[in-house]
Amino acid sequence: MVDFGGWDMPVEYSGILAEHEAVRTRVGLFDVSHMGEIEIRGPRALDLVQHVTCNDVSKLSIGQAHYSGLMTPKGTFVDDLLVHKFSDTHYFLCVNASNQDKDYAHIRENNKFGAEVENAGERYAQLAIQGPRALELLQKFTKTQLASIKYYWFTRGDVDGVHCIIARTGYTGEDGFEIYFAPEFAEKIWDHLMDAGKPLGIMACGLGARNTLRLEAGMALYGHEIDDTTTPWEANLGWICKVDKGPFLGRETLLRQQGIGVARILAGFEMESKLIARDGYTVLEGERGVGTVTSGGPAPFLKKNIGFAYVPPGVNKPGTKIGIAVRAQTAPAKIVTTPFYKRKK
Amino acid sequence: MYPAEFRYTKDHEWLQVNGAMGTIGITDYAQHALGDVVFVELPKVGAKVKAGEVLGTVESVKAVSEVFSPVSGEVTEVNSELSTSPEKINQDPHRSAWLVKIKLADANEAAKLMDSKTYTEYVAEKEKEQTA
């Protein structure tokens, strides 16, 4: 046996399958303090965020968040991120850990608006409480009426006596919350949530389950579905690409690509045998290689093997039969609509 | 933990020799490192393998891992139960979740592999590296 995937702990605590199931049916707790935070302040904070991201920040209300892309001048992804509006002059960005420094440099480089840009990752720990019983658990620790926070909205409030940003967001496809607070309280809040969560069947969850959950829920992962060679159109993320909002980085390229169409597009697929597709495997149409798997693996809750791949337009039509080159074999698969999994509201 | 009657490879396969026959599996260390096993691909009965060559594939939720044959020989039996219950590799890697049985081509090959004491030390060293 070689190559255990190059993963470091805490990839898993009790096992990815058990953790995945806990989040789908009960509640799971993730330490995602590695995520980066960047804060933008000043009278022209909106102009800066509007300039570097592709979603329309002017549509956000105070206390609202949205998913977006940090754009290169070519309309490709520097990163994907959540933009939270604290006030007209203060925005809070949650970015990928491995991209944080690059993102910060990129935002500063394009800061022709005199806004204050702070690389604030060191000031925040982040815990994600996810699953159908997340609200019930977190409510035990706060006076904030969590049920009144709508999906993709947030508020400030105390959790376990610690001042937090409490956001109803997540990366699992379940209901849940992500809380941001000063790192010195992380261990205490973690321990208290784990203890109080015991009767609810809580499980500590690692990066392994985070990945299977987001894939099953049809969410992109930077470095896989999106990177600085892919555009929102290609990544099937047109819903965050508001080219009509006015000028922003990459808009010209994105408008051009919108006109002529994309050469490849992200599609979800489902394996039709027991074979498992993995990142980097070739997508076949007949004998011909037409694309590459960006993420692939088991969908534990659906009990299927699924994946995302870039394929030529047309091939992405649900129901299209494709093959995946798995070692020496061609494994049958078919294109399906995403998300693969959608929770019952 | 690691049966004294087995021989072990650096790649975490075990071999149990019984006369001219050998049984091959992956070690407890390997199943633990892989995590939840969800798929096993084994050779066909009659396949001829050489020591160090790919014998099959074990996939967990997070990773694909090739299994290398500890010795040369001809596959005489495969554990077909693993195709429907791959999780047995996590539950009982040294016993019921054996992978293949093989007719040994060279009885002396097994002697080149680690004994259980050496392997136990080898694994302890690996674990130390990982926590360092």
Image (cartoon, grey):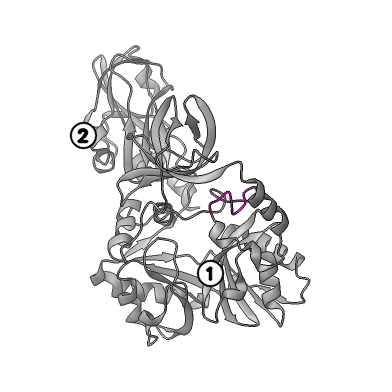
- Residue A130 at x, y = what percent? 37, 67
Residue B96 is marked as 2
- Residue A190 at x, y = what percent? 40, 72
Which residue is at the front of the view, A44 or A146?
A44
- Residue B125 at x, y = what percent? 45, 43
Q: In which quarter of the image is residue A241?
A: bottom right
- Residue A317 at x, y = what percent? 46, 42
Q: Which residue is drawn at 59% across and 54% down?
A: A232
Give the left or right position of residue A258, taking residue B10 as reference: right
Query: Residue pushed farthest front?
Result: A259
Q: Mark 1, chain letter?
A: A
Residue A19 is marked as none
The three-letter code of the residue at mark 2 reads Ser
Which residue is at the front of the view, B80 or A60?
A60
Q: Residue at x 44, y 53 (%)?
A: A218
Does residue A228 show up? no
Which residue is at the front of the view, B44 or A145?
A145
> Disc 2 on helix, strand or loop?
loop
Magenta residues (range): A225-236
Q: Spatial distance from mark 1 to mark 2, Cα to Cα? A: 51 Å
Which residue is at the front of the view, A2 or B70?
A2
Q: Quadrant of residue A199?
A: bottom left
Bin the neighbour count of mark 1 within 10 Å (Cα to Cα): few under 14, some 14-19, many 20 and up.
some
Q: Residue at x 57, y 78 (%)?
A: A85
Above or below, comparing residue A148 to residue A4 in the picture: below
Q: Mark 1 points at which residue?
A: A66
Give the left or right position of residue A109, taking residue A225 as reference: right
Q: Quadrant of residue B105?
A: top left
